Image: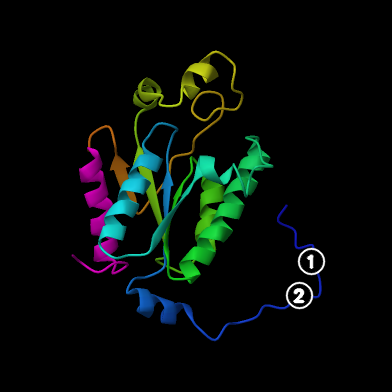
Amino acid sequence: MTIQKATNITWHEGNITREDRERLLQQKGAVLWFTGLSGSGKSTLALAVEERLFERGHLCFVLDGDNIRHGLNKNLGFSPEDREENIRRIGEVGKLFSDAGVIAMTAFISPYRQDRDKARSLLAEGSFVEIYVQVPLEVAEQRDPKGLYKKARAGEIKEFTGISAPYEEPRSPEIVVNTGELDLEQSVDKVIRYLEDRDIVRKA
């Protein structure tokens, strides 16, 4: 799916640069890539970070895994090949947001390291922030907010990450947030501090 099929196409540079947009927005474009098991708290944390940043005057947007599968990626399932294409598309969308000077947050299980690394390779150094939302499988399974683990254990969902499909933990993420130990406010604080320290957002 990644083969270039279109021919006779030319890349066009705009008159307004990424740096121009970042100056206007007073922030750096970035992709905050939240990854972790289902039930780890990725979406909850991403939405809370978005809310905190918005309150501070920053332009940001959350790309949620389930939401994207209702539109852009509605033709994809959960096979390894479809998961790869799912993440490839989101990586490209995240790059567009980042180039626009926006802080994009992606909340996807994104279970394979290779796929996450490909998404990282699309962005400039420092613009991709991998956030491992860490939680033991048993804790995620106890939470089971969507009842998916129960269905997976019953054999009703095939290729479910953590049960019948693998999850490859990040080897060196920029941030690790253990939602089994930190509450939501503490988790948000940890992400925001990182963004401030890297001058992606201004300090409050």
Residue at which label 1 appears:
6
Residue 172 located left or right of residue 112: left
Check residue 198 for magenta coloring: yes
Residue at which label 2 appears:
9
Residue 136 located left or right of residue 83: left
Tell me which segment is drawn in magenta: 183-204
Residue at left offset 46%, top offset 21%? 147
Q: Quadrant of residue 7?
A: bottom right
User: Is there CB contact under 8 Å for labels 2 and 1?
Assistant: yes
- Give the main secondary structure, helix, strand or loop, of the magenta stretch: helix
Residue 108: give x, y in percent of width and height: 48, 43
Q: Is residue 126 visible?
A: yes
**Amino acid at circle 1:** Ala
Residue count near mark 2 (Cα–Cα under 10 Å), binned few <14, some 14–19, many ≥20: few
Residue 70: give x, y in percent of width and height: 59, 42
Query: 70 and 6: which one is in front?
Result: 70
Element carrying mark 2: loop
Per the model, the C-alpha gap separating discs 2 and 1 is 7 Å
Query: 160 and 112: which one is in front?
Result: 160
**Amino acid at circle 2:** Ile
